[in-house]
Amino acid sequence: MDNKELAQLLEETGVLKRLAGENDFKAAAYDRAARQIENMETPIAEYIEGENVDSISGIGKSLATQIYAYADTGRLPVLDALHEQIPSGLIKWLDIPGLGPKKIYKVHRELGITEMAELVEKCRDGSVAELKGMGEKTAEKILSSIAFMEKFGERCRADQAASVAKTFNDFLFGQPGVDAISLAGSSRRRLETIGDIDILVAAKELHSPSIMEAFTTHPDVVEILAKGDTKSSIRTREGRQVDLRVIPEKHFAAALMYFTGSKEHNIATRARARERGMALNEYGLFQLDDKGDTNFDEPVNTKTEADIYRELDLPFIEPELREDRGEFAWFESHEKIDLLQAADIQGILHAHSTWSDGACTIHEMALGCIERGYSYLGLTDHSRAAAYAGGLTAERVEAQWKEIDQVNQQLADEGHCFHVFKGIESDILGNGELDYEEEILAGFDFIIASVHSALDMEAGKMLERMQKAAANPYCTIIGHPTGRLLLKRKGSEMDLNALVEHCADHKTVIEINANPRRLDLDWRYGRKAHECGMMTSINPDAHNLQMLDDMEYGVGVARKGWYNPERVLNTKSLEEISTWFETPKNERI
Ligand code: DGT
Ligand code: CA
Ligand code: CA
Ligand code: ZN
């Protein structure tokens, strides 16, 4: 049992209490307890053992009882009771962006509805708009959010898929007869959202039934969608579909290539095979006979994906690039493509501390970076306009600078070769200006400028606002440019090609926010960035130590976007980036 897991359950309890119409004060107690436990250094198990859970600040006797029950049974009784009491239809409404539990409760109580379809109907006929505190705009927003959800409802984020994939990968790897295992499909291509999870196992035919039996009876399986000797599909308790294929060793490379996709990439590789008198399918690469049909008796000897690509006159194409977005044309005139690797990243440039809305001190964040092998941290707490997130007043900025100097001294005394840079995540105000007077702006080592307010500004206006910020001589990096939340909020629809060009012209970096909920700038603008020489930076936007590990998602989509290490700011060494920060913006290369 870990603190994070318990914190999530407590947070969910708070939400469901509001959804059940209970008073806010009681619900807020669960939010507070969740935050307390999540940010606590000591494992909750120690308090449980010592029977002193109620000594934790913010946790009273009744909450403690719940936590003891959770330790015994793995369940929170209060949460189970809420799940019993609240119609399941209403719980689904929580996924509608912008519709919180209190509003849901109001609509439910006053209109007596519980299903998504009923909600759509009541938004359309004006009933929702008539409710006090709702209005026409809210009703319209609910409708467009539902439409968006329905379009993407079957997909999940890469991190959600990764945790399910890891469970099954680890489990299947240990099964008798499994010779090799690999992820395939969109997960292997490191797409930002995943439909279903595809896993391929190499095994002799005789082992197939027992492997499929083990797969379909795994404790996380709630539904078996299909079960056969070569393919089975299940649904997990998280609602994810996992497809497993068991393949004899000799077909494995071709199957891996086929099931990795993308479909568009496969179509192009098959065409290339045909042009060369061969046929490529999920079983292998074969010669064509004189009628032009696949001759299954004449396989071309290929053991690996690289072998197959070689027969097609191509180098190995990294899975991330297999989208038929120019990879074939590229290899007409290039031998290889230099792609960013996780090990190229030298430092972290977007992180928050307890000075604003982060969970850790500056020193703790620095140690977290050191532990992960980085050599610098660009600290960027929120600026003053983000008051809701503890944004720093000018006086607090100056106080923070003093602390950063002290932390740098302390780290040096502790023998670390590491540097904390003075940064800020400055709000981009409605008019495109940054959030402090020039004398403060000039004191930072670097500045990330992000939009956190008036997110739904009309696209043309938003572009102007962003361009103005990007042209500011103090703006080093544009943060999460569209503000999208994957599968939840669409983000600004401004002309990103124009923004990319503008930033390249002004030597302004656009980050790839590595938080798997954002992954913003989208990798699909990577080619444009490449063409005009725009730099990116892979930034975790970490609010605690665990979020530093989100870097892997940022690196994944940067690879999909064809970024080479030279165009990623935080591949620079500590020395290089110090010089780069000190160089006036228009003289940077
Ligand atoms: P997803 O699951 O929607 O995130 O995307 P994928 O790419 O994982 O798609 P999925 O699971 O339907 O299929 C896995 C791979 O199998 C896909 O990337 C390519 C291959 N595949 C599936 N159906 C077809 C097809 O009809 N034609 C071709 N050429 N390949 C296919
Ligand atoms: Ca898939
Ligand atoms: Ca699939
Ligand atoms: Zn931000």
Image (cartoon, rainbow, N blue to C red):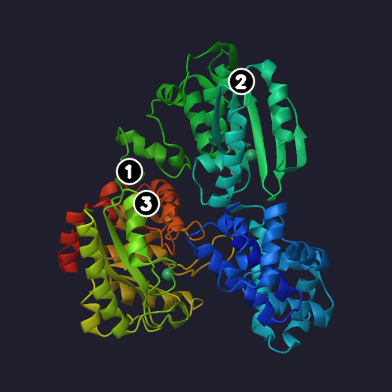
Cα–Cα span, label 1 and label 3? 22 Å
Upstream in the sequence, badge 1 or badge 2? 2
The image shows residue 509 at horizontal and vertical percentages of 30, 63
**Disc 2 within 8 angstroms of ligand 3 (CB):** no
Return the residue nearer the eye: 299 or 364. Answer: 364
For residue 68, side relative to residue 555 (left or right): right
User: Which residue is found at the position 39% from the left and 25% from the top?
Assistant: 313
The picture places residue 161, in percent across and down from the top left corner, at: 58, 47
Within-10-Å neighbours for mark 2: few <14, some 14–19, many 20+: many
**Mark positioned earlier in the residue sequence (2 or 3):** 2
Query: Which residue lies at the image location 70% right of the left edge and 79% below the top edge?
Result: 103
Name the residue tied to disc 3.
Answer: 527
> Considering only vertical position in the picture, is 373 above or below 268?
below
Q: Which quarter of the frame holds ligand 4?
A: bottom left
Question: Relative to 153, does residue 269 appear above or below in the rendering?
Answer: above
Q: Identity of the amino acid at label 3?
A: Arg
Name the disc covering residue 343, or none. 1
What's the residue at 82%, 68% (across, down)?
Answer: 85
Q: Check the image and report above or below for 265 versus 589.
A: above
Outermost residue toward the top in this view? 297
